[in-house]
Image: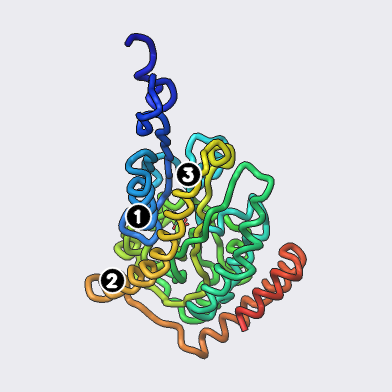
Amino acid sequence: GFGFHHLFPFKELPYDDDQKGLRDQVLIKFSHVVAENTPKGLAVDRFARLVEEKSDGRIKVAVFPNGSLYSDIEEVSALEEGTVQMIAPATSKLQMLSPKWGVLDLPFIFPNEEAVRHGLEGSIGKELLQTFDGTDIKGLALWSNGFKQLTTNEKVIKKPKDVSGQKFRIMQSPVLDAQFTMLRADGIQHQFNDTYSLLDRKEIDGEENTVSNIYSKGFYNVQQNMTITNHGYLAYAVMINRSFWDEQDEETKNIILEAMKEATAWNEKEALEKNKEQLQYIRENSSMKIHTLTKKERKEWLNALSPLYKKYEEEFGPSLMKEAIKLRD
Ligand code: LMR
């Protein structure tokens, strides 16, 4: 009864074969950076609940939202080192692992929701998840948030030239950086949870994000304008530490995969709902001025940014680029 057993409740407790609950306890720490009431936050919570239910409490998923454990800049190394077991970063932030992920950041690659589904669930999504083969990371799924919009402090954005000279917070993505450079604007990489105070202190003029993030992090309270551009898409790669995965028995792996499948299907619908509902909220309850790009304006944006497709042709490879252009057109 003495000793260090209480410190190692998952491994060292004495047990016999009937005490399955004690024997096979598994703890998954899942870290993410967004609020809980968001497409990702809700999908993580749902995944956690499903895993616990399916395993009768044997597998626990401890969720750390809002960057409370690791920021978006730190979380990929934390996963690789195994200090957390799961994360779901924006695909934009994975170009440091493989430049191919940048394909999803090409401006206006997805003209609509249907194209997003083709992209994430079809051959592009498969090829991207395969970039994890032979690494410390196993890719489990692609989740959705939604289309990105532009918010600014003073300047009303309608035409591509309207962003020139403005500073925008961007994610850690070379393609997003190139996108703003092409528009003669400044894309400044900062961690997600610093964005609010940077906007509040007017150290930057604007940012690009989904309505859900603009709503849940209160950016709409510190920005005067929003333009519904749908110029980019925010998707997530759900990832698990590979050695942790390899250590699990078949039953545990199956439960995780099943729960992931259900949470992913749910996320797809919930993401659309949340962004729609929260746009409505911002329209009705804030002083933010909202402009939606007209068809003509959208065309101007696409023309201004289409050289990026040429620029990245070589880096992404012909097969990905061909698929990307097919989706776009
Ligand atoms: C951002 O950094 O703007 C987003 O990636 C945050 C998130 O995870 O949705």
Contact flag, marks 1 and 2 (Cβ < 8 Å): no
* Secondary structure of the residue carrying numbered label 1: helix
Percent x, y of residue 198: 41, 53
Judged from this view, the residue extending furthest toward the left is 285
Residue at x 33%, y 50% (from the top left corner): 49
Percent x, y of residue 318: 76, 70
Q: Is residue 301 left or right of residue 318?
A: left
Task: Identify the residue under disc 3.
Answer: 251
Q: Report crowding for label 2: few under 14, some 14 to 19, many 20 or more residues within 10 A (C-alpha).
A: some
Q: Report crowding for label 1: few under 14, some 14 to 19, many 20 or more residues within 10 A (C-alpha).
A: some
Task: Identify the residue under disc 1.
Answer: 46
In which quarter of the view is residue 201 placed? bottom left
Residue at x 71%, y 67% (from the top left corner): 312
Q: Quadrant of the image for the C terminus?
A: bottom right
Mark linked to residue 282: 2
Q: Amino acid at mark 1?
A: Arg
* Secondary structure of the residue carrying numbered label 3: helix
Q: Earlier in the sequence, mark 3 or mark 1?
A: 1
Q: Earlier in the sequence, mark 2 or mark 3?
A: 3
Q: Earlier in the sequence, mark 1 or mark 2?
A: 1
Scheme by which the image is coloured:
rainbow
Give the number of the mark in front: 3 or 1. 3
In which quarter of the view is residue 76 placed? top right
Residue at x 28%, y 71% (from the top left corner): 282
Label 1, label 2: how many angstroms apart (C-alpha)? 26 Å
Q: State whether residue 216 is above or below residue 113.
A: above
Q: Amino acid at mark 2?
A: Ile
Mark linked to residue 63: none
